Image (cartoon, rainbow, N blue to C red):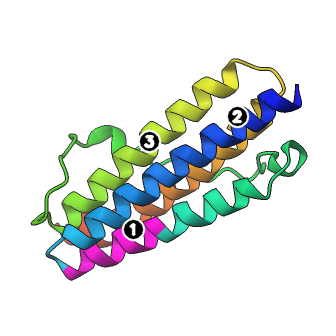
Amino acid sequence: MQDDLQKTLDFAIAKEEQAETFYREWAYKARIPGVKTLFTELAAMERAHAEKLRQATPSTLIAAPDTPSDLRLSELLVDIEASPAMSLQEAMIVAMKREEAAVALYERLAMLGGDARPIFEALAEEERNHKHRLEMEYDDSILTEN
């Protein structure tokens, strides 16, 4: 059972590292300063998650009950491919879609149940918080300007 939980943690750490790498690479490639800043911040958040997971035990990863409200903005937006010349709006959409996919993945894995369920629930919550932050920022800076 402990081996299964460790494999679950290792899987989650790898997903967080992949997300960090994606954001770091696109922060480097992006031509617009705001996009660089956004992706640099997101890479740091993903790195912090990976570090948290490296030090975690299943009992420390229980999902917090204060789930932020879901604005569901990402569900209304069309997928966009990342590109060096993407605008801040496009970068935010890319990030929201990635966080939405991460939430869905961890929620599906949590539904499998078992000892790893609390870990996946906590990870879904972390990604949901990222998505919420991005949606709030998008609503404040993009939607209010249009």
> Tag on residue 8?
2
Q: Amino acid at mark 1?
A: Glu
Q: Quadrant of the C terminus?
A: bottom left
Query: Which circle marks residue 100 in the picture?
Result: 3
Q: Is residue 132 above or below residue 88?
A: above
**In the image, 45: left or right of 91?**
right
Quarter placement of the N terminus: top right
* Residue at image coords 28%, 75%: 36
The residue drawn where x is 44% and y is 47% is: 99
Q: Amino acid at mark 2?
A: Thr
Report how far apart the C-alphas of labels 2 and 3 lie in the structure: 20 Å
Q: Earlier in the sequence, mark 2 or mark 3?
A: 2
Whole-angstrom CA distance, mark 1 to mark 2, is: 32 Å
The crowding category of the residue bearing disc 2, from other C-alpha atoms within 10 Å (few below 14, some 14 to 19, many at least 20), is some
Q: Secondary structure at mark 1?
A: helix
Q: Is residue 19 visible?
A: yes
Answer whether residue 83 is magenta in the image: no
Name, please, the residue furthest toward the front.
Answer: 3
Q: Are marks 2 and 3 in contact (CB under 8 Å)?
A: no
The quadrant where residue 120 appears: top right
Amino acid beneath label 3? Glu
Find residue 7 and report its horizontal and vertical position in percent. 71, 33
Is 37 covered by the magenta stretch?
Answer: yes
Q: Which stretch is magenta?
A: 33-43
Give neighbour class at mark 3: few <14, some 14-19, many 20+ (Cα, 10 Å): many
Q: Give the x, y percent position of residue 28.
A: 25, 72
Q: Mark 1 Cα within 10 Å, few/some/many (few <14, many 20+)?
A: few
Q: Nearer the viewer, mark 1 or mark 3?
A: 3
Q: Main secondary structure of the magenta part?
A: helix
Tell me the number on the disc at residue 137: 1
User: Between residues 35 and 144, which one lies in front from this camera angle?
Assistant: 35
Closer mark to the observer between disc 2 and disc 3: 2
